[in-house]
């Protein structure tokens, strides 16, 4: 094993740093050229090789975005990396830059397709790589309109791929991994892509992209509320037209957009999104070129048929969003019923029937708890179950399902099991997130269980290990699901009555909200 911090890549030498606790880290390695100026909205362009040693000891830029301040409870999700369009960079954490051929885990950050960074504190890979002997890669890429601005009919053909440029960035990052990761102690033939929330959606979309075929060998989708169906082109084009109108530029003139300051673009985008109550957004699109189909509709994609899948969610994802307004935790039964009916567009009978199922499963639960369960199941759990079902029906690779049910003590326990809750456990960063996780006696074991499950899946395609109960593959008969909690266990078809009830609700309506009165 070598502790050398100097590695020769296909583009030139990079120097990282060694940790006092062991292992090496490399920060801000470019995998493609800056996306500023003439490269804006184009597919990722090659990096010019360098002859000197490149210092890679500090995080590179994250894509320009509207920064959302983090509360103390979720400060571990924050990133201090600078923002800028030279953002096609990645970070590598490894036990050693040797020839050991360790499993490679490539993490795609959350934040929908609008914000976030692979440089957030919780993704620092020392604990995961040291304890589980894997190589971790975290990636920055283009977001929001910089990565997903749909071209219009008649636009310059140079910008034909602008609607999915951010996904093409991820393909370029995976190509870099294929060509270079062996020099960092990783195995290019054992690559797992995993991501949470928007990152989970990115994983699902990569599973449907021809350009990504063969660049990864396992996939983990965590808490994705989108990505199983992506926006049709007509919706994407409408958002683009509104952006041009807001900026008072000729419709479809992408060259003119290249000259607009990034901050001005962000403000215009924010105005367009706000005016439509979030319905106009900038995210991947079925363009007939880089993305030709929905990832898991009407079936699982053939291009990733041989890729094992692990997929799951937290039990009450929605409490993360409900917490933006503390009064949401005082919602009574009548208010919850009104919100659910409005959002799901159900008639009185349909609303009452749905609530009756959830009330039977959670007797005496207050309105905000029922709201959290229904919102979670509709926006997250149902998508994940659908993805698992489609992959099982394909029948060519195993599927493993999980639910994260551990409950945070933060906010007096009102969070229960919110969106993002599993992240500190997967990365071995429970201590960093102590304002959220607390210091319960169950934490060390649950952290070990989850780190090892993710690493074992990356290593073998099976998350089973000796500190977990037997974890069968998911099937349409048993629906075996690992429920991670203080006492982790496998449950067949957990909350099955709720699964059936929420599955009968019509498809998602983005123009309404469960989180506002």
Image (spheres, rainbow, N blue to C red):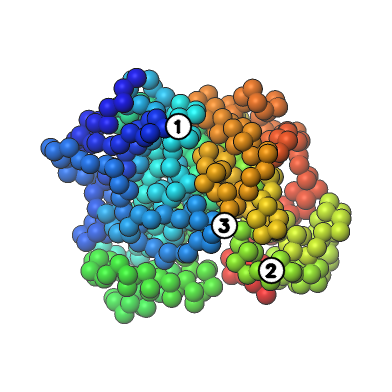
Residue 13: x percent and y percent? 20, 34
According to the image, label 3 marks what residue?
Answer: 73
Residue, disc 1: 129
The residue drawn where x is 57% and y is 57% is: 73
Quadrant of the image for the C terminus? Answer: bottom right
Mark 1–mark 2 CB contact (< 8 Å)? no
Q: Residues within 10 Å of mark 3 (few under 14, many from 20)?
A: some
**Residue 28 spot, x, y in % from top left:** 30, 45
Q: CA distance from mark 1 to mark 2?
A: 39 Å
**Which of the image's four quarters has the N terminus?**
top left
Q: Secondary structure at mark 3?
A: helix
Q: Which tag, 1 or 2, sits closer to the chain's start?
A: 1
Question: Position of 18 compared to 360: left or right?
Answer: left
Q: Nearer the viewer, mark 3 or mark 2?
A: 3
Question: Which mark lies nearer to you, 1 or 2?
Answer: 1
Q: Left or right: where does residue 6 sit relative to residue 489?
A: left
Name the side, left or right, on which 341 lies relative to 99.
right
Q: Nearer the viewer, residue 186 or 166?
A: 186
Name the residue tied to disc 2.
328
Up the image or down, 137 lies above or below 472; here it is below
Q: Earlier in the sequence, mark 3 or mark 2?
A: 3
Q: Are marks 3 and 1 in contact (CB under 8 Å)?
A: no
Task: Give whichever of 438, 11 is nearer the camera.
Answer: 438
In three-dimensional space, the C-alpha distance between marks 3 and 2, rounded to whole angstroms, equals 18 Å
> How many numbered tags mark residues here?
3
Q: Position of residue 61 (x, y in %)?
A: 31, 54
Q: Is residue 467 visible?
A: yes
In the picture provided, is 73 more to the left or to the right than 247?
right
Compared to residue 45, the image places residue 216 above or below, namely above
The image quadrant of residue 443 is: top right
């Amino acid at each position: 094993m070598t502790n050398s911090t100097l590695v020769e890549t296909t583009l030139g030498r990079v120097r990282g740093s060694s940790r006092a606790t062991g292992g090496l880290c490399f920060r801000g390695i470019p995998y493609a050229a800056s996306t500023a100026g003439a490269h804006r909205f184009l597919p990722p362009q090659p990096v010019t090789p360098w002859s000197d040693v490149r210092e890679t000891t500090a995080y590179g830029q994250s894509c320009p975005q509207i920064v959302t301040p983090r509360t103390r409870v979720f400060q571990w999700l924050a990133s201090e990396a600078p923002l800028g369009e030279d953002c096609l960079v990645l970070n590598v954490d490894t036990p050693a830059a040797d020839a050991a051929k360790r499993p490679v885990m490539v993490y795609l950050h959350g934040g929908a397709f609008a914000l976030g960074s692979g440089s957030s504190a919780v993704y620092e890979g020392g604990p995961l790589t040291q304890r589980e002997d894997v190589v971790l890669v975290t990636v920055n890429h283009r977001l929001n309109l910089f990565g997903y601005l749909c071209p219009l009919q008649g636009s310059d053909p140079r910008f034909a791929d602008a609607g999915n440029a951010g996904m093409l960035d991820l393909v370029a990052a995976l190509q870099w991994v294929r060509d270079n990761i062996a020099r960092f102690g990783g195995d290019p033939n054992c690559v797992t892509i995993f991501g949470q929330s928007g990152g989970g959606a990115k994983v699902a979309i990569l599973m449907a992209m021809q350009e990504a075929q063969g660049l990864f060998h396992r996939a983990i989708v965590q808490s994705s509320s989108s990505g199983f169906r992506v926006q049709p082109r007509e919706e994407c084009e409408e958002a683009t037209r509104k952006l041009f109108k807001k900026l008072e530029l000729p419709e479809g003139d992408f060259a003119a957009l290249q000259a607009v300051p990034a901050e001005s673009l962000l403000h215009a985008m924010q105005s367009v999104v706000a005016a439509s109550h979030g319905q106009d957004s900038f995210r991947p699109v079925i363009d007939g070129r880089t993305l030709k189909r929905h990832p898991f509709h009407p079936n699982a994609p053939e291009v990733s048929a041989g890729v094992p899948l692990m997929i799951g969610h937290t039990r009450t994802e929605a409490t993360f969003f409900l917490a933006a307004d503390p009064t949401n935790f005082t919602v009574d039964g009548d208010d919850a019923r009104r919100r659910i009916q409005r959002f799901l567009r159900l008639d009185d009978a349909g609303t009452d029937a749905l609530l009756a199922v959830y009330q039977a499963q959670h007797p005496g639960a207050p309105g905000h708890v029922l709201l959290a369960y229904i919102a979670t199941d509709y926006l997250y759990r149902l998508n994940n179950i659908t993805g698992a079902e489609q992959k099982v029906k394909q029948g060519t690779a195993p599927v493993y399902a999980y639910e994260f049910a551990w409950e945070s003590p933060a906010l007096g326990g009102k969070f229960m099991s919110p969106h993002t809750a599993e992240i500190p456990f997967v990365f071995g960063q429970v201590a960093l997130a102590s304002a959220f996780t607390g210091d319960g006696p169950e934490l060390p074991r649950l952290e070990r269980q989850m780190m090892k499950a993710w690493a074992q899946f990356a290593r073998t395609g099976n998350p089973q290990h000796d500190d977990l109960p037997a974890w069968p593959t998911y099937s349409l008969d048993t629906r075996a699901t690992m429920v991670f909690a203080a006492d982790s266990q496998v449950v067949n078809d957990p909350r099955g009555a709720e699964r059936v009830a929420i599955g009968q609700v019509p498809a998602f309506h983005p123009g309404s909200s469960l989180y506002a009165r």
